[in-house]
Each structure stands twice: as C-alpha cells, then as structure tokens.
Amino acid sequence: MSEQVIGSGTAAPRNIPIRKRDSNSTVAIRVRNVSKSFPGVQALRGINFELLSGEVHGLVGANGAGKSTFIRMLSGASVPDTGEIEVQGSPLLFDDPRLQSGAGIAAIYQELTIIPEMSVLSNAFLGKVPSRFFVTDKRRMERRFAELSEWMGLKIPPHANAGSLSVANQQMIEILRAVQTDQNVLIMDEPTAPLGPYERARLYELIGRLKESGVAIIFISHDLDEVLQLSDRVSVMREGLLVETRTAANWTKDTLVQAMLGDVQIVPGSKRTHASDQELLHVSNLALPGRVSGLSFGLHEGEILGIAGLVGAGRTEVLRCIAGAEPSAQGSMRFVGVDCPWPRTIREAIGRGIVLAPEDRKRQGLVLSRSSLSNLMLADLPAVAVGPVIDRSKTRERGTALARQLGFNPERLDAEALNLSGGNQQKLVLGKWLNRKPRILLLDEPTRGIDLGAKQEIFQAIRRLSDQGMGVILVSSDLEEVVEHSDRVLVMARGRQIDILDGHDATVERILNLIFAVESRASDAGVS
C-alpha cells in the first residue's frame, strides 16, 4: 500500500518537541458576556467561559447549540456583537484572524482544510512556512516534520500528494499543523470523527502530552465517552447558551445528554430479526489492487449490512468499488439474481440502482452554494422537469416530501447548504439519493460530526427505507454504531474479509478480537 496508516505501535519518544509552558493553573482564555446574532438567528447569548492553561476542557452540545460560532470567534473567524475575550490576560483583537495565531491560538476544524493538490509537507506548514533570508527553508521543514511525525506516531510520506491520503491521515496532518505552530491554546473540533479505535488511542496520548506541556485544549466531540475520559472540565451548550460547567468527574453520560437536549428524548433504535430471502446483490472475489482482496458477500432486500474495521482496512474502498468509483476493481457481481459486469463508472452503478453517500459530504456530496431544495433534486432533475424547463411547483412539492421523510425542516429548503448544520447537510445527501429511489444505498460515515438527536433521525430514516425493501451497506468508524444498527456485520482487516457475523452475535469486543488477531499475526510476520 502506498499510504501507511497512522501509528507505528511503538511508544512515543520521551523528548517532547514543543516548548514547555508554565501553567500554574493560569487562565488561558476568559470570555465575558459574549453574544452573537445572524439574520433571524441568535447564535450566542451572554456566554461566560474560562479555559485554564494545561487543561482539557470539553465542550458539548447538539448541532445548532452554538459551539461552532463560539470557536470561530475564538479563532478570529467571527466577531462578537457584545462582550469581550481575553487571552493570557490581554484583550483579543478582531482586526485580522492572523492575530489569533499571534496570540497563541490554533484551531482544528471539523471540516478539513487540507489542499489536496499540495504535498503533505506543504500542508503541514500551510500559513507558517519557515524561511531563511526570505527563502523557504525546506530542510528545516523536513526536519521538523520528521520530528513531529515520530512524536505523534505517524508514518505519512512528507512528499506524498495530500489528496491521496485517507480522511483519517488528512485529519492527523491538520493536527500536526496546529501542533507545529507551538501555540498556547489548541481548539479541537471533532478531531476523532474520522479515526478508528487504534488511531483514536494515539491521538489521546498526544492530547495527554500536550496537556503536560501546558497547552490549554478545548475539545469538542459528540462522543461523550471520550469527552468524559479526556476532559478535566466539561461545559454544555444549548440554544446559544452555556448552560452548565462541571468537573468531568461530576458528569455522567446520561446527565450530559439531559443537559444537551433539555426536554428532547432519545428513543433507542430497534434491530431487525431477519431480512428478506431475496438477494439484491452478491459480490464474489472483489479485489482492488494494493488495497482490497478476496471479498465475497451478499446483501438481501431490506437488510442493513455493516462493514467494520480499523482505518486503512479497506471499508471505503469496498463501497467505492460497488459504486463504480474504482475502474480498476475486479470481481463478479450478481444484481437481483442476474450476473452483470462490474460497474466501471458511477453513472453505470446509478443506472442499476446503486448509489453512494460519501464520507466527505461537503466536497463530494453537496453543492454548498446551492439551496437545500436544489441539492435534493440534483440526482434526478428530469423527474421535476417539463422538457428542458424545471417545474418549480413540482420541485417544491417533491422537496417538501423528502424533507419531511428525513426530519428536515421544509422551511429551510431555500437556505444554502453551506449554512446548515452537519446533521442537516447529511440529511440532504441522503435525500438527494432517495429522490432517485435506489435499490441499494451505500453509506460511508453517515453520522460523522452529528449530534445524538440528528443521528437518531438519520438511522430512523435508514431503517424505514430498509423496511420498504432497500438494501443498505453501512460503514462507520464507530463500532458501537455498526453493531447497534446492522442486521449482519462484515469484519475486515488489512484489505481482507475476516468474518461475517449475525447482527445478534456481533459485539464490539468480538469484532476487535477478530481484527487484532489479524493485526497481531501480521505484525509478528513483519508485514507493514
């Protein structure tokens, strides 16, 4: 494989390649009575907040609670209407976002800012390139990159094209970029969302070492278990308010959910006891040179088939092969009982009724500058056209029906997709393909960066679709999510199929045991 996954399995070096800070529990950031509004929306309401040096401060809340607006303000991308912010005792100025970097604040956003056409090395030093006599000091860049990569446990070639990396490794380059700037405050917005269990463990170690060096960290995640595990204190936001702050030991997962959602109740999902005997899809000996080898499985009508594995196992590649996005894929396919050639293009797969909702919804799933309604219609414009002209009335009627089916507020159909929460954007991606009425829906990380309420709505919609006979293949880095919502689970490691488990027999522990048995044998054999 051309790209090695995160982590070497060895302990991190003792010498920390960033300067030691004198924390002494000083206040790194103090926010007083900060408010912010946008047309029709009061995003923040009188926020008061303190972040201590050497502290990991968890920040949680449902989508739309105001977290993103708050951290954009701290990083200089947004200006408060009222209130004041101090960094290390000095007022924060908003004349130029670069001043925030000068004040010692670095942010890692949920949506990646990697430039795909540039090298890994150039991306790692984007915005802060070391120079000597006004000329880029490439040797210094390479030396610093190697030092930080070793410290972080990364094995990513510095001169590789950044666009060729997995989303997980792109995320780690974003984190390396923030760490190399040697800032006092680090804001992490859903940094573990694209990572598997092993990669998350490496990041947790890194956060611990940054904390020991005196860096103050704001940690935002919808994974409440990791928030409680990593944080010293946790603050909860709801509807633009900071409703409560407690030490992590004084929160539980249940009390966090209660504080986040207020009166909203989460209803547990139900699993199917059986699927139809009708097989929609049968894949035999699927292979993608250098990445996937020898997969054979079936998908039944009305079934949700989960694919579980660590980052780099080949899960996304399997979906892309089935969706016709990998022309070099090899294997045999039987669709609704009929043998057919392997799809070589996305158009060919769509023609058979196979569609893919990709992991990167912003860059691959939506046209962000277009309205929600336009995005819902994108995959099947002829269905709402009269000759060459789009029928606005039919478009509105169809879009409203799709929105209601997915729990999307029809009143927001005219809003640009760019301005929606992650949960609502994901609903648009699903709705776009539902408009095509596919037979098979391929879902790659459908709940990445989405709050508990939106996750529930999305999985309820997916289960309703499977109840109507649609076949679904689900990939998620959250193994609990795969186990909870899948009727069967295909387990992968190192590009190969290990086992297929019945949904009622699948547990996170069993899946990890299967995976790590393969990883251990590969390690003993010296396979990289």
Image (spheres, helix red, strand yellow):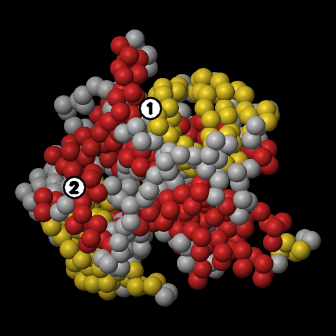
Q: Nearer the viewer, residue 511 or 415?
A: 511
Q: Is residue 128 visible?
A: no
Q: Amino acid at mark 2?
A: Leu
Give amino acid for label 1: Val
Q: Looking at the picture, does residue 119 appear above or below residue 375? A: above
Residue 423 vs residue 52, the one in the foreground: 423
Coordinates of residue 336 in the picture (x, y in percent): 74, 41
Q: Is residue 495 above or below residue 345?
A: above
Q: Residues within 10 Å of mark 1 (few under 14, many from 20)?
A: many
The answer to whether residue 422 is left or right of residue 32 is right
Q: Identify the image quadrant of the C terminus.
A: top left
* In-front residue for pair 387/404: 404
Residue 235 is marked as: none
Q: Is residue 83 above or below residue 406?
A: below
The residue carrying mark 2 is 228
- Residue 75 in percent (x, y) is at 36, 65
Residue 262 position in % (x across, y down)? 30, 76
Q: Secondary structure at mark 1?
A: loop
Quarter of the image for residue 435 reads bottom right
